Image (cartoon, rainbow, N blue to C red):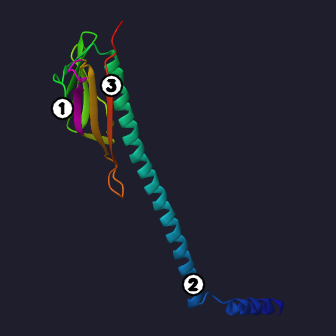
Amino acid sequence: MRNKLKKQKIIKVLLNKQGFTLVELLLYIGVFSILILALFQLFTSIIDTQIESQSSSSVFLDGQYILNRFRYDMVRAKSIITPSLPAEPGTTAKLSIDNATYTYSLVLGNLTLTNNVASTAGQLNSADTAVSNLNFTRLSDIRGKNTDTLTISFRLTSNIIKRGGPKAENFKTTVGIRLKQ
């Protein structure tokens, strides 16, 4: 008899147990959907910020590296081979440094530096950027003398794709050869 009462209690409990109503299920799904949407927007915002930061930093760092390398070579240079005439812009610069010719030129969107003695060539910008509008201009003073100064200008564009379009920045500097004493 006791077993029979226990079985009846268990059956009553199981029969009286209620599940979720349709309204409760819809409410839970709605709240869960809002939570997932908020997390997705947060995630895409983080990714966009990271890509934009990477794009900006690659343009800035490559630009600074190219300008610093150009200044370094100009300080060591004995003479400027090309551009040969003052105020004549060119897309190539050749410097005489330690009995070697260093050539700055644009090759397929990359700024390259070539040394004719060591037969070496190197790309100065990273794979994350492209160089365009490269221009070298030789400067002179009012009397047309002291032509040992060059201006380099170029545009760096990021190859990293971001929502607002690629990051691009113009760079320019003027450097003169130091006279050896």
Residue 22 position, x and y percent, is 56, 90
The tag earlier along the polypeptide, 3 or 2, is: 2
Marks 1 and 3 in Cβ contact (< 8 Å): no
Above or below residue 59? Residue 112 is above
Q: Magenta residues, as a range? A: 133-145
> Looking at the image, is mark 1 or mark 2 earlier in the sequence?
2
Amino acid type for the residue under numbered disc 3: Val
The answer to whether residue 23 is above or below residue 143 is: below
Work out how far the residue at label 3 is from the one at label 2, CA to CA, in angstroms.
69 Å
Residue identifier under label 1: 89
Q: Which residue is mark 3?
A: 175
- Image quadrant holding the N terminus, namely bottom right
Which image quadrant is residue 84 in? top left
| Residue behind mark 2 | 27
Q: Nearer the viewer, mark 3 or mark 2?
A: 3
Q: Please name the residue shown 36% across and 21% down the image.
A: 72
Kindly give the residue lying farthest to the top in the view shown: 181
Please state which of residues 71 and 43 is positioned toward the viewer in this rendering. 71
